[in-house]
Amino acid sequence: MKENKGQKTYFIKTYGCQMNEHDSEKISWILENMNYIETQNIEEADFIIYNTCLVRENAEVKVYGNLGSLKQLKRQKADLMIAVCGCMMQREEARNVILSKHRHVDIIFGTHNIHKLPQLINNHLQTGETIVDIFEDGREIIENINSNRKYSYKAFVNIMYGCNNFCTYCIVPYTRGRENSRDPENIIKEIEELAKNGCKEVTLLGQNVNSYGKTLKTDYSFTDLLKDINKIDGIERIRFMTSHPKDLSDELINCYATLDKLCGHLHLPVQSGSNKVLKEMNRNYTKEDYLKIINNLKKLVPNISITTDIIIGFPGETEEDFNDTLELVKEVRFDSAFTFLYSIREGTKAAKMENQIDDKVKHSRFQRLTDTLNEIALELNQKLVGKTLEVLVEEVSKNNTEVLTGRSRNNKLVHFKGNEDLIGSIVSVKIENVKTFTLEGSLV
Ligand code: 5AD
Ligand code: SF4
């Protein structure tokens, strides 16, 4: 925590994905350049920012709930400033809810105009009015925003923005706009700078990173980018999120064998194991295509970790479709998965589909899926007992100050005893005990 020399303080709450997390790091950088200082205590903040998500209904409901409870704070502190930004604000309906029911909000901005924040703050301070500023699309990539990154040894780096896929359940293409790749020179420059400042691990971010390059004027692909990043001195680990199975090339699979810095982990959302549901979702691959990718990967890199996203209760999902998902889970043997109950998003194709699934049925399937996933995750972790893993030390454990936590190359969370001086370094840990979601071991 930095020392406060009478500066104004800000509190930022981020909902949703890594893309939002990284946007918040940019907002934080902008504010610190305006001489604001971060506080973790919302009640003492002079400026509160909610960076929102609307990928599922519960994320949206939480934002409205939390905004409601700020009314009281605003009454007590007349000069408290409140801003709401992020994906929700790209939707006119959500902006209208804020403007009519949450009139204590001072500034509304979106996902494409974060760079305008200083101007929006000034406009509000000068006029006292609610400022609403939204760019409907993100065709122009703004390069001169830096990030106030939480960790010095690992960093998120945007490589592309937006999505062209229009999966029928998903609101993201409507909020983040069309696919747009950053120029490779800018990405490389950013990562070289990070490496100079001690960063060891980069996670390349985009809604669909393996279609990176399609909007560039030159012929340069995601694998070209990986190869160039692999050459940067100081960077020891490369990760990326998220990939789409329909764009996952053999060339990318080969990178796992040829690029020493590429970590042995792939997050590849499958969403469903039923070909009928995948078609209705507009995913453009079959269960067989997905399994082929996984088998090719496992042949080349036997210890690779595979994680995924699965949606339960998409409209029309029958018991048979659900069983196809369970079967796929058993065949792939995912290391872990994010599982979601299907949530209706107004404006998407699936919202208009008939035969929406009853909540009780969704919950029962969700539970059966979770049980299967957890059983497999534990079995896979048990195979790691006795093995020595390379771990990037991230922080002191929240529950026990003698214990450090870090991530192995295949993205497992590892706990072990050690001195906090080790934070930011890469160490070897011998695994002794495992749970479903974590490994425990000792430094070697
Ligand atoms: N309902 C439930 N889950 C969804 N996701 C995206 N949209 C929805 C929705 N309407 C999930 C997908 C995606 C992840 C980021 O969120 O699984 O991969
Ligand atoms: Fe949404 Fe599909 Fe694009 Fe992912 S690929 S952001 S699920 S539309």
Image: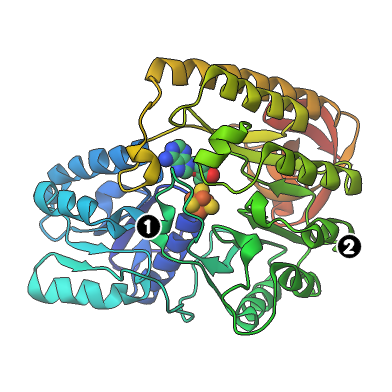
- In the image: residue 37, left or right of residue 410: left
- In the image: residue 321, left or right of residue 416: left
Please give the residue where the numbered disc 1 appears in the rendered image. 174
Answer few, some or many: residues within 10 Å of disc 2's Cα (few below 14, many 20 plus, some between 14 and 19): few
Q: Nearer the viewer, residue 106 or 295?
A: 295
Instruction: Name which residue lies at 63% across and 53% down.
Output: 243
Instruction: Name which residue lies at 41% across and 64% down.
Output: 177
Residue 72, relative to residue 201: is it above or below?
above
Please give the residue where the numbered disc 2 appears in the rendered image. 258
Q: CA distance from mark 2 to mark 1?
A: 37 Å
Instruction: Name which residue lies at 47% across and 55% down.
Output: 21
Residue 398 in sight from this viewpoint = no
Q: Secondary structure at mark 2?
A: helix
- In the image: residue 42, left or right of residue 53: left
The mark nearer the N terminus, 2 or 1, is 1
Q: Could you tell me the amino acid type at mark 2?
A: Thr
Q: Position of residue 312 (x, y in %)?
A: 51, 28
* Image quadrant containing the C terminus: top right
Tag in front: 2 or 1: 1
Residue 223, relative to residue 313: is it above or below?
below
Q: Position of residue 106 (x, y in %)?
A: 17, 61
